[in-house]
Image (cartoon, grey):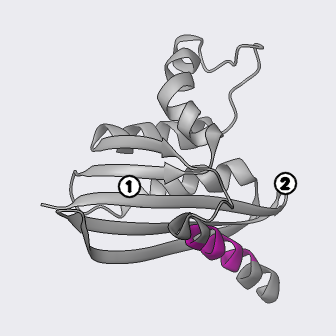
Amino acid sequence: MYNFKAYTDGACSGNPGIGGWGVVLLAEKNSTIMKRRELSGGSINTTNNQMELIAAIQSLKALKKPAKISIITDSSYVKNGITEWLYTWKRNNWKTSSKKDVKNKTLWLELEELEKKNKVNWLWVKGHSGNLENERADFLARQEISKIKFNI
């Protein structure tokens, strides 16, 4: 059985603006990478936070069956949202501590449902700090932005 690691990233040109997301998905066995898969996509009118969330969602959707996975993100918004804030948002009827509506509720709900089907370990890594797989996920996200801009 494999253990998985997903390095996820989102990017936006303008916020909101044209956005992209990227994922480097690694399947490991005994700490050896057995399989590697890259995923990416984008959207014309989106935000950076939406792209970060979609990258995490897509990494979980890529799993063929429930699995143990570490999702490594450079987004504090995603990591803190799913591990700390979600419970309080739900308890407070999807309101933030400042009584505003929580943004991206639909994406948070989708991420939560996918997380429940897997054993997820959420890890944060500093962006643009030389982590090769995080840098690759960022490249994939930015490449999607370029593709969309080229086709408009």
Q: Quadrant of the C terminus?
A: bottom right
Residue 13 lies in quadrant: bottom right
Q: Who is closer to the viewer here, 96 or 32?
A: 32
Over which residues does the magenta segment extend?
136-145
Q: Secondary structure at mark 1?
A: helix
The amino acid type, in three-letter code, at marker 2 is: Asn
Provide residue 99's location: percent of width, then percent of height.
Answer: 75, 13
- In the rendering, which numbered label is found on residue 15? 2
- Give me the residue at 46% from left, 69% from top: 24
Sequence-wise, the earlier of marks 1 and 2 is 2
- State left or right for residue 144 relative to residue 53: right
The x and y percentages for residue 34 are: 23, 75
Q: Position of residue 100 (x, y in %)?
A: 77, 20
Q: Residues within 10 Å of mark 2 (few under 14, many from 20)?
A: few
Q: Name the residue beneath numbered marker 1.
A: 60
Rendered-image quadrant of the N terminus: bottom left
Q: Residue furthest bottom?
A: 150
Type of amino acid at the residue the image marks with label 1: Leu
